[in-house]
Amino acid sequence: MFQDDKEIEKILSALGELLDARNIMIPDLVVCGGSALNVLGLVRRTTKDVDVVAFAENRAGSYYLRSADPFPDGLEDAGKRVARDFNLPETWLNSGPTSAVEFGLPNGLMKRVETKRYGKKLMVHFLSRYDQIHFKLYAAVDQGPGKHLSDLEALKPGAQELLDAAQWSVTHDVSEGYRQSVKDLLRYLGHDDVSEKL
């Protein structure tokens, strides 16, 4: 369990050092969730892992994003070594949310990320507050009350941000039941006006 941003960055630095020592080249990591919220100072809470939503490759100044599943062998092995060294679960670095890539990520996501380098081989792009609102709204509807809803409330999204996030999320689940759940959540958050627009 990571207590704060310093612990998360210490582990990412250790991963970067190991990749450097082994001379392992990997794609850039695009990270969302609790670890990104902590590192960017958006939400302060414990988190158990680092969620990789996508791999990013810079091609002539433009980023190409692809699924983070599966991890390259070098990254998988380095992640497990760090887990052993720091007594972490083997899945501390995982691609849990990467299915979002096939449905489509929010437009312009890579223009809003905050990027940090850990050593020479590890580049991490942390999702912006705006894009975290998208992911947290989707997760809050999908999984119900809990950390995702708490994170969403802590981000204090405005009406337009919620509308953008809601419109994006219903492209990932086109069922009428899901749309109704999104509308219910918007009303719970005090945004009846946004709910009516969906």
Image (tube, grey):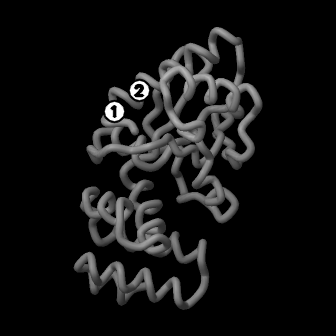
User: Would you place residue 122 above or below residue 161 in this image?
Assistant: above
Residue 106: give x, y in percent of width and height: 53, 59
Q: Is residue 34 visible in the rendered structure shown here?
A: yes
Which residue is more in the foreground, 99 or 80? 80
Does residue 80 sit above or below 106 in this rendering? above
CB within 8 Å, label 1 to label 2 = yes
Q: Amino acid at mark 2?
A: Glu
- Per the rendering, the mark at residue 92 is none
Query: What residue is shown at x 51% (from left), y 18% (from top)?
Result: 14
- Closer to the camera, 85 or 160? 85
Q: Residue at x 34, y 66 (%)?
A: 149
In-image side of 171 versus 144 (left or right): right
Q: Residues within 10 Å of mark 1 (few under 14, many from 20)?
A: many
Image check: 55 left or right of 3?
Answer: right
Name the amino acid, label 1. Asp
- Graded by Cα atoms within 10 Å as few (under 14), some (14 to 19) or many (20 or more), the crowding at tag 2 reads some
Please name whichever residue, 118 or 105, is drawn nearer the observer in this view of the structure.
Answer: 118
Question: Who's the residue at 36% across and 89% down the image?
Answer: 196
Q: Position of residue 188 (x, y in %)?
A: 27, 80
Which quadrant does the C terminus fall into? bottom left
**Residue linked to disc 1:** 5
Residue in view at x 61 percent, y 29 percent: 79
Which disc number belongs to residue 9?
2
